[in-house]
Amino acid sequence: MNTLDGKVAVVTGGTGGIGRGVAVELAARGATVVINGRNPQKADAVLTEIRAAGATADFLAGDVLSKADMDDVLGETARRHGGVDIVIANAGGNDDEARSPEVRGPFADIDLARVTTFVGQAVAAKLLVVQSAVPYLRERGGGSVVFVTSEGGRTPTPGQTAISTFSGGLIQTSKLLSKELARDGIRVNAVCVTVVRDSPSWTAAFEREDGVSQHHRRQYEKIVERAPFGVAAPQDIGNVVAFLASEDARYLTGTIVSPTGGLTLH
């Protein structure tokens, strides 16, 4: 299990949901984990869990939509822990907007000005942290970048214009970066997810009456009904991300993985 001994990882959006599952699994494999988010109180439970298992973890606040914040997070990580080896670009930037009926809904009814603004923010949330990390990954002689994004970028789903545009573009960008950064020994892969338990999207759909539109909720209910292996938990996604970040995957770059439990096949 100690496939990440001596590695330093930064996980954006690591205070809950999928990010929490990723952070815990990286730590379980020996990595020092720096959790990035905006709320230190939300990070406390994750830090406590990781430290109780004997691993090292820190929280560094910062907005993934701010290049200055991401520069600060990566710089402080390197200062505290000697460098950066792994970057998990998980945070979405504006998840509430992604669930708004004006952004997620039939194409004829959505607000395209809001959609295009969301797409720009969502892309920035994934790419800014990676750009800030590149100098530190180069200093280590290489490293691993893993994007966590939506399966909507691979599988066309009605009502998901914004997600398809953002995630589909990010998938292509991850492939481009895998080629561009290969000369530096930096691997770039992407993990595409659908409904995940114990995540903000799950809470909005199934635990808040007004969290999503009825159309959105029905889509999620169909996924729950049809997924052959059931619905993933954050730990299930964390296991896949941790593998891609590790030396076990040292010959994988430009790979797009969809841990959807058999719901989608590629």
Image: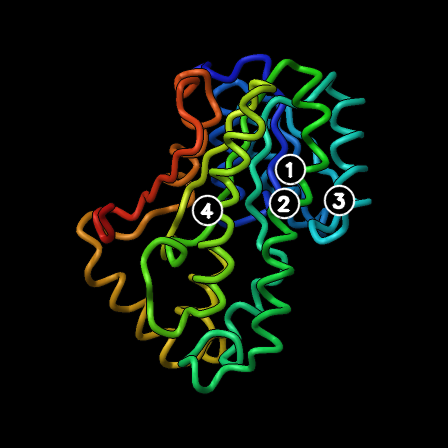
Q: Residue furthest bottom?
A: 109
Residue 68 pos. (x, y %) = 82, 45
Name the one closer to the observer, 235 or 89.
89
Of the residues shown, which amino acid type is indicated by label 1?
Val
Visible residue check, residue 54 = no
Of the residues shown, which amino acid type is indicated by label 3?
Ala
Name the one closer to the observer, 40 or 48.
40
| Residue displayed at 54% across by 13% down | 5
Tag 4 residue: 171
- Cβ–Cβ under 8 Å for marks 1 and 2: yes
- Cβ–Cβ under 8 Å for marks 1 and 3: no
- Cβ–Cβ under 8 Å for marks 4 and 2: no
Tag 2 residue: 127
Tag 3 residue: 61
C-alpha span from label 1 to label 2: 5 Å
Q: Which mark is residue 130?
A: 1
Residue 254 pos. (x, y %) = 43, 33
Of the residues shown, which amino acid type is indicated by label 4?
Ile
